[in-house]
Image (cartoon, rainbow, N blue to C red):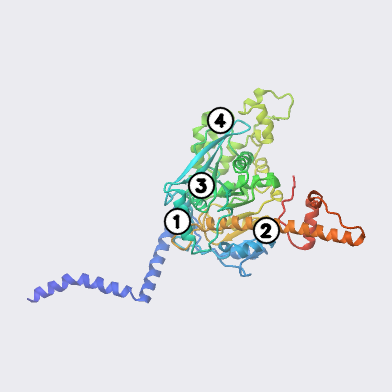
Amino acid sequence: MASFVGDYILFLFPSVLLLLLSLTLRLPRVHCWTGLAVRALSWRLWVIICLILGLPLHKNTSARAEEVKSAGTNILSGSGQISDESRLICKPTALAKYLLRHCGSLAKPRLATWPRGDPHLQTLSSLLWGQHGEALQFTRDNLLLKDGGIIAVDWAVGTKMGEAATRKKWDVRKEHQSGVRAPGYFTSAPPVLLLIPQYWGGMTPHLKMLCQQALCQGFYVVVFHPRGTEGCPLTTARVTEFGDPADLEQAVAYVHSRHPSSVLFAVSEGSGSGVLLSYLGECGSSTYLTAAAAISPVLLGQLWFETPMPPIYRWGALFHRKQQLRRYASSFRGVRDVDRALSSSSLRDFEEALFCSPAQPQLSPLNSGLSSRSHSQWGLASSAAWALDERAYPAKDWESYWERNEPLRDADEVAVPVLCVCSSDDPLLPPASTLPLPLFMSNPYFFLMLTDRGGHCGFALEEQGGEMWSHISILEYFRVVAEFLRGDERNRVSWSALMEENSQARLRGWSMAPARRRKATEMRRPRPQAADQCAMDAQEGNFTWKRSYTR
């Protein structure tokens, strides 16, 4: 009998032990200690994995944040104080203050913390892992360019479950939040959102999520694909350089021709900002864009290519670029150093081998004696070489390549508001201390939203909703900018009418003759030139968001 009781106790002992352990873990203090222990153990394990893979650790970014704060920048926040998590660095203009008042997502983002907010996990998930939810459906337009090349623009036409159901789902979810709508949501001409992928092309899950969210908010969504990427056929022996905006300029003109009465916005992802910023600088006020945004942008292209990247990211980017080049290797061998590019071990070596030619013959499309045979050896016709000018041929060296391709080379010519969303722990970009802060402090068209966490094109929210803070803030930013510009235009028209009325009243006071009714065309007050307008604004201490025609 005693042995039976002993065996019974031994049989129940594991169950009793588990019961006591579960009851103990329910205690608040024990539960907190257990969570801290598991978190610390997980962090130690993650440190070992990062050391093996050669990934930099970014657990604490407060030191770099202090560097940015001590740089003497203009930092604004909704409460008038510097936020520890995010900083809006810009020139304190009327638009900047309007953004802080009406764009709530920029005030204090609640970004995810470790482990979900780890920069490497966010970066890899945004670039590689599949998208959750409904698959997007696109229809493609292939555009024939002036030089004979072809680019592709993909129009998002909805999801598998249908665009109407998706919008309804978004409306229910957003009803409990800000209750805002995209500009033109209930109008006959909804806004158009042009998306520009990474420099190496392809639709990442991060970009697909932005497409889906923009569709839900009533945008027409179109994705720009450079020649030779994402299944776009390559019909000329020429690929797009890092900061060459010629193809994007023709794509924007085409999109505008499809929806001439719609407001046009543009968003770039990562290295795709090189072509977007170059386009804004070269086109100036002649662009069809109303506003633009860049998520994790490459602001200094040469520095980005020359800064060593963690091995896992460098290998991935190089593999993608080499796969694209191998597809057209036989066509490029006569005009490019393909073998050197395929054997390169860094992004700089690949870019330099593909686009720089030290032994380049001294050819110029402006030469009257230039034969069509000389042009054909570069894969270009004479008319195409004339249109492309210096880009018709490879650059002479690395420095001259960046003289014509640096994204911010014409930053002073930008004439639309540009929001750059950056993270201090971005593992693919140079350190935050290298950001061109003086540009954002002095140029009223540039805004820098700098966060402590977010990775590269990540910016996951603390809530488990699957949405990205960068997507929410950028779409809201477009809505607020559109409202501000419409209000500014109305105020400017009202001011002109008031000044004309006061002028007529003074004339009536000076002359005893009765006032004569003038035609509507004669009542229009001539607009001041750009220089006069800027001088007037400088005297008044504010900035008017009228596009100055600089070209």
| Residue occupied by mark 1 | 169
Looking at the rendered image, the quarter that the N terminus falls into is bottom left
Q: Is there any visible trace of residue 224 in the rendered image?
A: yes
Badge 4 element = loop
Q: Are marks 4 and 2 in contact (CB under 8 Å)?
A: no
> In front: mark 4 or mark 2?
2
| Residue occupied by mark 2 | 487
The Cα–Cα distance between marks 3 and 2, rounded to whole angstroms, is: 46 Å
The Cα–Cα distance between marks 1 and 4, rounded to whole angstroms, is: 42 Å
Going from N to C along the chain, the mark reached first, 3 or 4, is: 4
Name which residue type carries label 2: Gly
The label on residue 235 is 4
Residue at image point 51% right, 47% down: 314
Few, some or many residues within 10 Å of mark 1 (<14, 14–19, 20+): few
Going from N to C along the chain, the mark reached first, 3 or 1, is: 1
Q: Is there any visible trace of residue 443 in the rendered image?
A: no
Badge 1 element = helix
The Cα–Cα distance between marks 3 and 1, rounded to whole angstroms, is: 39 Å
The label on residue 314 is 3
Q: Are marks 2 and 1 in contact (CB under 8 Å)?
A: no
Name which residue type carries label 4: Thr
The Cα–Cα distance between marks 4 and 2, rounded to whole angstroms, is: 46 Å
> In front: mark 3 or mark 4?
4
Going from N to C along the chain, the mark reached first, 4 or 2, is: 4
Front residue of 85/462: it is 462
Q: Are marks 3 and 1 in contact (CB under 8 Å)?
A: no
Badge 3 element = helix
